[in-house]
């Protein structure tokens, strides 16, 4: 299966360096959902960049990788619908381990598009 154009998830759309994650965790706006903590911050790029953190508290390696794949897939498919020019860090909570793809997509859609979001400083 070959993905083309806007369906790809290129390296330019990812947070890759530790310094990028730390900068976002120190100065980003926090959004909370049942399964995720989402940090966002404006960047100097024309597109969004995504970082995903899933700690060992969520589950074993298989579970953690499944959560990361589902989050990346949501971001890849809905990137055009999100406000542009932001770095987004998604931190999974232990409840994300048992979440279906649909539930993860619903939570992320609500949090990232602004419907039903709860902000905490």
Image (tube, helix red, strand yellow):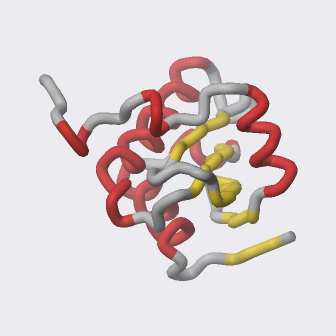
Position of 100 with respect to 55 (left or right) is: left
**Residue ID at (47%, 67%):** 83
Give the quarter of the figure containing the N terminus: top left
Q: Nearer the viewer, residue 1 or 13?
A: 13
Q: Nearer the viewer, residue 110 or 23?
A: 23
Q: Nearer the viewer, residue 73 or 35?
A: 73
Above or below for 60 versus 20: above
**Residue 52 figure quarter:** top right
**Residue ID at (70%, 56%):** 39
Give the quarter of the figure containing the C terminus: bottom right
**Residue ID at (54%, 77%):** 114
Above or below for 120 versus 100: below
In this view, the residue farthest toward the top is 61
Position of 112 with respect to 59 (left or right) is: left
Above or below for 2 versus 13: above
Q: Position of residue 20 (x, y in %)?
A: 72, 36
Q: Position of residue 18 (x, y in %)?
A: 75, 27
In this view, the residue farthest toward the bottom is 116
**Residue ID at (68%, 45%):** 91
Above or below for 32 versus 104: below
**Residue 27 figure quarter:** bottom right
Q: Position of residue 93 (x, y in %)?
A: 69, 46
Task: Tally the numbered discs.
Answer: 0
Q: Position of residue 50 (x, y in %)?
A: 54, 43
């Amino acid at each position: 299966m070959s993905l083309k154009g806007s369906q790809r998830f290129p390296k330019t759309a990812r947070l890759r360096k530790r310094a990028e994650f730390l900068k976002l965790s120190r100065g980003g706006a926090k959004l909370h959902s049942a399964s995720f903590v989402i940090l966002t911050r404006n960047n100097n790029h024309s597109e969004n960049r995504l970082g995903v953190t899933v700690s060992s508290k969520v589950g074993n390696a298989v579970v953690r990788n499944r959560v990361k794949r589902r989050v990346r897939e949501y971001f890849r498919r809905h990137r055009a619908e999100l406000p542009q020019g932001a770095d987004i860090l998604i931190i999974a909570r232990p409840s994300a381990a048992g979440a279906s793809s649909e539930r993860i997509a619903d939570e992320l859609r609500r949090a990232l598009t602004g419907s039903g979001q709860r902000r905490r400083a």
